[in-house]
Image (cartoon, helix red, strand yellow):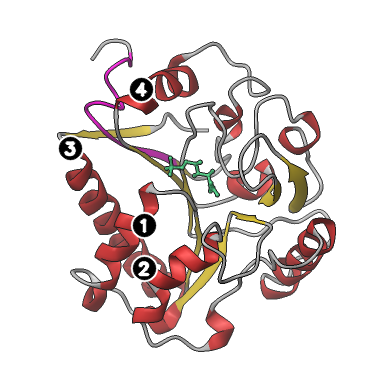
Amino acid sequence: MSEPKITILDDPQSVYVHAAEEITHFSGEDICTHAEFTIALSGGSTPAAIYELLATRFRLSVDWKEVQFWWGDERCVPPDDQHSNYAMANRTLLSHLELRPEQVHRMRGEQAPAQAARAYEQELRSAFSLADGEFPRFGLVMLGVGDNRHTLSLFPGHKAAIEETQRLVVADEVEATPRPRVTFTPPVANHAQRAMFVATGKAKAEAVRDVIAGPRDPLKFPAQIIQPSDGELIWVLDKAAASLLPNR
Ligand code: 6PG
């Protein structure tokens, strides 16, 4: 387990550009070494700006036909709902690329949550040719952190999801709208080559401080559970989000 690599930039726009550059760079490396880049997208408002940059300024910098898109979590709503993480990524990025349908692996938010979680786990097992007890190795798992210190849909106090060690994907009811969610479990993110948190703004400063520098307590600060065992942990922050980190 290595120390996190933390990059702090002046403002949110510089953060979005840096994150898009990193994704471009990771895709190039992975496509060069194993002919494919597997990315798990995050939801929320922060990544939308990154997806828009990837679809425009960086569109010609990625060999999109070699990219496999997955999601780290999904709200249980239909794929055209305003709360759907798939809908957001589709609007800002996927619909601007010429992708084959088999490159896009969305969580079925329209199904019953437990069923959608089982189906996604099955899809992962089959696409990554996993035997029992194995986990996929994503090129990149994108992550955000909530004001309440959640990441993916792993919410404070949700012991079963936070401490899950066998399942790849679980369903849960969380303290946010919409409540039913489907989410990767920690071991999926922790088997990735790279896990990259992106956060901007003063409102995230306390959460960023607690997750990076607070006492270890993943039940209270779920984003702390993300620690790739044989991969990189990356944080991209603006000055405001990083403002409460010690020694800065
Ligand atoms: C979601 C997420 C979630 C998100 C955080 C931070 O579906 O909501 O994937 O874990 O990353 O809530 O979101 P923001 O970066 O938009 O604040």
Mark 2, secondary structure of its residue: helix
Q: Position of residue 172 (x, y in %)?
A: 76, 44
Q: Earlier in the sequence, mark 1 or mark 4?
A: 1
Q: Is 209 rendered above or below residue 146? A: above
Q: Position of residue 167 (x, y in %)?
A: 80, 50
Quarter location, residue 49: bottom left
Q: Earlier in the sequence, mark 3 or mark 4?
A: 3
Q: Is 106 rendered above or below residue 16? A: below
Q: Are marks 2 and 1 in contact (CB under 8 Å)?
A: yes
For the point 53% across and 80% down, the residue is 103
Q: Position of residue 199 (x, y in %)?
A: 36, 37
Q: Are marks 1 and 3 in contact (CB under 8 Å)?
A: no
User: Could you tell me how far apart the alpha carbons at marks 1 and 3 are, in whole angstroms?
Assistant: 16 Å
Q: Earlier in the sequence, mark 2 or mark 1?
A: 1
Mark 1, secondary structure of its residue: helix
| Label of residue 205 in the image | 4
User: Pointer 2: what residue?
Assistant: 92
For the point 69% across and 38% down, the residue is 174
Magenta part of the protein: which range?
233-245
User: Pointer 1: what residue?
Assistant: 48
Mark 1, Cα crowd under 10 Å, few <14 / some 14-19 / many 20+, is some
In the rendered structure, which amino acid carries the disc numbered 3? Answer: Asp
On whether residue 242 falls in the magenta region, the answer is yes
Q: Earlier in the sequence, mark 2 or mark 4?
A: 2
For the point 81% across and 46% down, the residue is 166
User: Could you tell me how far apart the alpha carbons at marks 3 and 4 are, in whole angstroms?
Assistant: 14 Å
User: Could you tell me how far apart the alpha carbons at marks 2 and 1 are, in whole angstroms?
Assistant: 6 Å
Q: Is mark 1 within 8 Å of ligand 1?
A: yes
Q: Earlier in the sequence, mark 3 or mark 2?
A: 3
Mark 4, Cα crowd under 10 Å, few <14 / some 14-19 / many 20+, is many
